[in-house]
Image: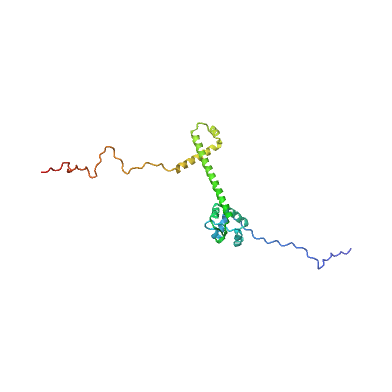
Amino acid sequence: MSETTPPPQAPDDAPAAPTSPAAPVTAPAIAPLNPAECAQQLKQRFPALFGGAVKPLKLRIQVDIQERAPGVFSKQTLSAFFRRHTGATSYLIAMTKAPHRFDLDGQPAGEITDEHRKVALDELARRRGNQEERRQLDEQQRRNRAGLLHDFQTTTLTKANFCALKGVPVDELDGLLEIARGEAEERARLAPPPRHAPAFDRPRRPEGERQRHPGGDRPAPGGDRSGRGGRGRG
């Protein structure tokens, strides 16, 4: 039998086998908050800024929040909240009226630039215009439904012919008429009561009735209550 050759030995100065690097330590995930929960947390932690009347926020306020409340709010949570918060009409009004911005402690933290103030004013004007357009559209639709109800109540056409004349789908007519009836009842309920003629404090006497003196019949001049004339001179 041949001798078995032993395996070669690694020299003492041979480089060690590479080891896999240690996995990086990841921070625990921050529980997501919806905008309402985020608002409640901010109000509890920073009441000077988020409690009470709406105030214009210091620029880059998210950085301050993360430093003062680490691990509470994720970047996505704060971004979603502030998009909603700074887009609210109440915040835009505050931007047009307040002289400066505020930090987490409710202290002044920078002036509001004319550019930012103008952006808020322009957005408010745009929203007012949209509201007026919607109001006019709603009023026109109310008038159209009232006219539709009136015409339907007085028409002699069949329902199908009436819908064809008015350009209304047959399956939508009943719903439109129901809305119109409800609006008519609302108008009647909100209408001011009819004005009545002023009532007199005392009822009028029938014509021809004799007016009596408070103390009875007034005695004739110079006579007594029996109606006899006064005594003649002796």
Image quadrant containing the C terminus? top left
| Nearer to us in this view, 193 or 178 | 193
- Identify the residue at horizontal 50%, vertical 35% (top origin): 151
Whether residue 85 is visible, yes or no, is no
Q: Position of residue 67 (x, y in %)?
A: 61, 62
Image quadrant containing the N terminus? bottom right
208 left or right of 35 in image:
left
Position of 37 relative to 155 (above/below)? below
- Identify the residue at horizontal 49%, vertical 41% (top origin): 183
* Quadrant assignment, res 77: bottom right
Q: Position of residue 169 (x, y in %)?
A: 56, 36
Q: Position of residue 159 (x, y in %)?
A: 53, 33
* Quadrant assignment, res 115: bottom right
Position of 219 relative to 161 (above/below)? below
Colour convention of the picture: rainbow
Q: Position of residue 164 (x, y in %)?
A: 55, 33
155 left or right of 119 in image:
left
| Nearer to us in this view, 176 or 195 | 195
